[in-house]
Image (cartoon, rainbow, N blue to C red):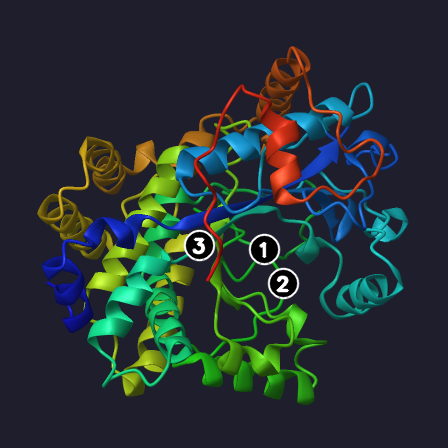
Amino acid sequence: MFSEIGQLIFDNEAVAKTSDFTMGLEIEMQRVDDMGNLSQEPYPAAAGDEQTNPWITNDFLETMSEVVTPPAAHALDAMHYLYSINTALRTALSPGELLWPLSMPPRLPKDKSKIPLAKMGPKKEAYLKEWLNRHGFSEGTPSGAHVNLSIDPHVFNLVADNMADRFSSHIELQNYLYTKIAQGFLRYRWVITYLFGASPIAEANYFEEGEGPTHPIRSIRQSSHGFGNKFTGDYTNVQHYVNQIENGVKAGKLISDYEFHGAVRFKGNTNLKELPKTGVNYLELRMLDLDPSSSVGIRTNTLRFFRLLASYFIMSPGLHPEDVNRVIARADEMNEEVSEEQPTAPSKYQAGARAFLQSLEMYANKIQLGPEYQEELDDLEDRIENPLTTPSAKLMTHVENGSLTNYALRRAKRYQESALQSIRPFKGFENKTRLSADELKHELFKGSWEPDQDKQRN
């Protein structure tokens, strides 16, 4: 089961460190009115300056709010950050405003030209306008949950100390392990789409007449009908990743390297060209629809599952370099097929998904991860056997006249009412001061929750 690196980690009783990732979250949600239309209200002043506040900002549209958490040592800490910042955003909204809980946007006006793009400064706004010219309005409107994940430094130190003959530098090791995890997530992205897809239909005016799927599907957002540029990345190694994106920019297929919206992105140096030399610091995983059953768009158990996946990918044998592009291309095809399946039907790849979950369960048992992981795997295995228990299938029970608007509004109002009942909502963004992560932690919780010491991304 274990690779050479995995066996080394296991023999040194350091397996727990392979699931002890630092995590950060980025959750996008549209501001809407109480009728389910994109909000006409200005950007909420109490949320701070959308151009400088790193914790609440905008993405693509002026109505697309994005909550960003600091990196946290544990999934539960990340969720407490997310909940608190999400509540701060909700309490900053104008009366009657809500946060739309679905990945696919609310009904859009037929004339989309009047909907304002995000006010992010001249350079970013010029980029957004060019993006709009290339892709059209609708493609920029789906929202999602992004998970940022970085490896515990103890893992790097252990491997570097014992495999100096294999890795010439700490940076080479970093890049190798992050590439290995990225390949794993891309290889099994189709399983994630099946388990967590939650965008079965689009609301009015998202698709032009005659476009889009002819029936509800598991995930519009994760399919070719969903978000953004369809440019294919190269995950053979970090240098190949950079070369592919830079070549795409030179060929005019990408406006800039920022436009690469792969399901996984390597993050580190803001100068992409220098990334192979300076090293990947963390991965941005972009393959989750919003979970409308959670007020913050994602559940703690989902984060635990992602941590388990990443640990499994570190410990297991990886792909041979010559196989990477072929395997991931096939996985992309499988993801497209799974995303376009009827939400209530068993997947074409049910047997493969079952086998993969069983491998994860064997791994979790072998390293004794604990009951919370076993419980989550039991629930996910049930989703594979019973497609009616998947998020997308559950959403189909709430469709009325081809729309989820009534369901989404019920959820949005419930979450908004809960946020407004907060005894001490956070007001620290009102003066537009740019808060550091440490300042945010101190001001946000003030004794109500004490996150473990946040680890720095290496």
Residue 250 horizontal/vertical position (percent): 68, 89
Residue 215 horizontal/vertical position (percent): 49, 46
Choose between 420 and 442: the one closer to the eye: 442
Residue 270 horizontal/vertical position (percent): 64, 70
Q: Residues within 10 Å of mark 2 (few under 14, many from 20)?
A: many
Q: Which mark is residue 149?
A: 3
Tag 1's secondary structure? loop
Real-space CA distance between mark 3 and mark 2, rounded to the nearest whole angstrom: 23 Å
Tag 2's secondary structure? loop
Q: Is residue 229 found left or right of 312 in the rendered image? A: right
Q: Which mark is residue 228?
A: 2
Q: Is residue 407 found left or right of 299 in the rendered image? A: right
Q: Which mark is residue 212?
A: 1
Real-space CA distance between mark 3 and mark 1, rounded to the nearest whole angstrom: 33 Å
Q: Amino acid at mark 2?
A: Gly
Labels in figure, total: 3
Quarter-wise, where is residue 257 in the image? Answer: bottom right
Residue 192, placed above or below residue 414: below
* Contact between labelled residues 2 and 3, with CB atoms less than 8 Å apart: no
